[in-house]
Image (tube, rainbow, N blue to C red):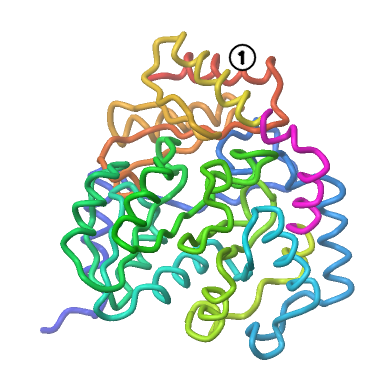
């Protein structure tokens, strides 16, 4: 007798259970007593009064949703204003706002890697870049992590359009890509460079203008930058920044832009307010880096194996997936929320606690975090 169509799911669930890789949703309350080092609110702006007020004002003026794709009814004056100011802040010629950072990465990679092209992708790239490579019509070659020479060698084997794709700050360990060397290699072979600056915007560069800006790549004609509005800017959504002709090309060809409902006005309003606030208070970016460095020093001082942060992400190695899950749960029970990264989220198969520094954390809070991590360590 034929089995039911989804019986195979049960075996996959049992496999995840045996491997300690079960994931579950855990809704959080509006007001949580936990000290949050699990989210990505690097600058502490998600609940800033100016940001939340701007979100509410945008919803009242423009409505609860964008009502359609950006090419139909989903573009508002607010979207255009956000694009202009985001491009100016980061030093790009133009910008295009999408409904998420994930959608922005899919848009950039698929639209810029046509049939016959080569995509050279870092082994540590975020899942959204990986999926963009899978969906693109070009051929993808994965190279070792943060290895500009490997990128050069891959580009040397190809004639025709080519693209190197990398995170600026890798989301697992928080290390930064060698953007200057990567750009030099791309220029040597006439290739474009796509940089996902999700974890760099608001933290790196002058006043938080991002890792490409810090590397001297802002406004470069051969460089495209993607960002998310959901981390340092405390909102939601994503954007692609780059030459105007690239942005025009995405408007006409990027499927995650053309066929997706536009970013909700409340999110656009919140992101714009956060961007303006960062422009007035550039010290927030430096403070986030300072907090990350201090947290790393405290953890290493307690004997933990941690990766020195290049931005605001700190990872602490755990002995196994199951141990990482228990450790994170014990931290939560003790009042501190931390991230827990396990396979397949980590490319090297090593489970970790992942901590995110926030500009609004003080020394007492950092001491509390390290104390909880130490007391609950497996």
Q: Which residues are magenta?
A: 271-287
Note whether 195 is above or below 361 in the view shown: below
Between 120 and 264, which is closer to the camera in this rendering?
120
Q: Position of residue 116 (x, y in %)?
A: 24, 78
Is 184 placed above or below 268 here?
above
**Which residue is depicted at the point 25% across and 40% down?**
349
Q: Give the quadrant of residue 35.
A: top right
Q: With respect to residue 329, does 139 lie above or below?
A: below
Residue 207 appearing in the image: yes
Q: How many marks?
A: 1
Which residue is depicted at the point 32% across and 35% down?
Answer: 351
Label 1 SS: helix
State yes or no: residue 295 in magenta. no
In the rendered view of the protein, which quadrant contains the N terminus?
A: bottom left
Residue 9, position as x, y percentages in the image: 26, 66
Nearer-the-camera pick, 120 or 314: 120
Residue at image point 59% right, 31% down:
357
**Pointer 1 local density, CA inside 10 Å: few below 14, some 14–19, many at least 20:** some
In percent of width and height, residue 135 lies at: 33, 74
Give the camera-side residue of 312 and 154: 154
Quadrant where the image shows the C terminus: top left
Q: Residue at x 24, y 51 (%)?
A: 152
Residue behind mark 1: 367
Q: Nearer the viewer, residue 369 or 235?
A: 235
As drawn, 132 above or below 145: below
Q: Residue furthest bottom?
A: 72
Does residue 7 appear in this view? no
């Amino acid at each position: 007798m034929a089995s039911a169509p989804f019986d195979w799911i049960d075996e996959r669930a049992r496999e995840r259970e045996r491997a300690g890789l079960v994931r579950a949703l855990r809704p959080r309350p509006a007001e949580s007593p936990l000290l949050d080092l699990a989210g990505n609110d690097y600058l502490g702006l998600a609940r800033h009064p100016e940001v939340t007020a701007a979100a509410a004002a945008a919803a009242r003026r423009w409505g609860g949703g964008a009502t359609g794709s950006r090419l139909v009814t989903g573009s508002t004056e607010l979207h255009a204003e956000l694009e202009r100011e985001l491009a100016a802040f980061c030093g790009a010629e133009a910008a295009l706002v999408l409904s998420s950072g994930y959608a922005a990465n899919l848009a950039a990679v698929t639209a810029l890697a046509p049939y016959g092209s080569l995509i050279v992708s870092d082994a540590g790239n975020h899942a959204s870049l990986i999926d963009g490579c899978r969906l693109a019509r070009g051929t993808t070659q994965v190279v070792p992590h943060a290895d500009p020479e490997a990128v050069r060698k891959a580009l040397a084997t190809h004639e025709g359009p080519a693209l190197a794709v990398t995170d600026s700050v890798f989301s697992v360990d928080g290390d930064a890509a060698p953007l200057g060397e990567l750009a030099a290699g791309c220029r040597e072979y006439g290739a474009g460079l796509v940089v996902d600056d999700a974890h760099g915007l608001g933290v790196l560069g002058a006043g938080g203008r991002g890792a490409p800006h810090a590397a001297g790549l802002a406004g470069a004609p051969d460089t495209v930058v993607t960002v998310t509005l959901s981390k340092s800017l405390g909102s939601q959504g994503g954007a692609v920044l780059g030459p105007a002709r690239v942005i025009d090309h995405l408007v006409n060809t990027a499927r995650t832009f053309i066929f997706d409902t536009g970013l909700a006005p409340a999110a656009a309003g919140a992101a714009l307010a956060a961007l303006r606030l960062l422009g007035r208070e550039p010290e927030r970016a430096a403070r986030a880096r300072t907090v990350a460095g201090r947290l790393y020093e405290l953890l290493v001082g307690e004997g933990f194996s941690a990766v020195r942060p290049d931005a605001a992400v700190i990872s602490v190695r755990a002995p196994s997936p199951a141990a990482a899950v228990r450790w994170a749960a014990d931290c939560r029970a003790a009042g501190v929320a931390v991230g827990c990264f396990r396979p397949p989220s980590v490319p090297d198969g090593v489970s970790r606690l992942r901590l995110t520094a926030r500009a609004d954390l003080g020394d007492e809070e950092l001491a509390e975090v390290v104390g909880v991590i130490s007391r609950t360590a497996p």
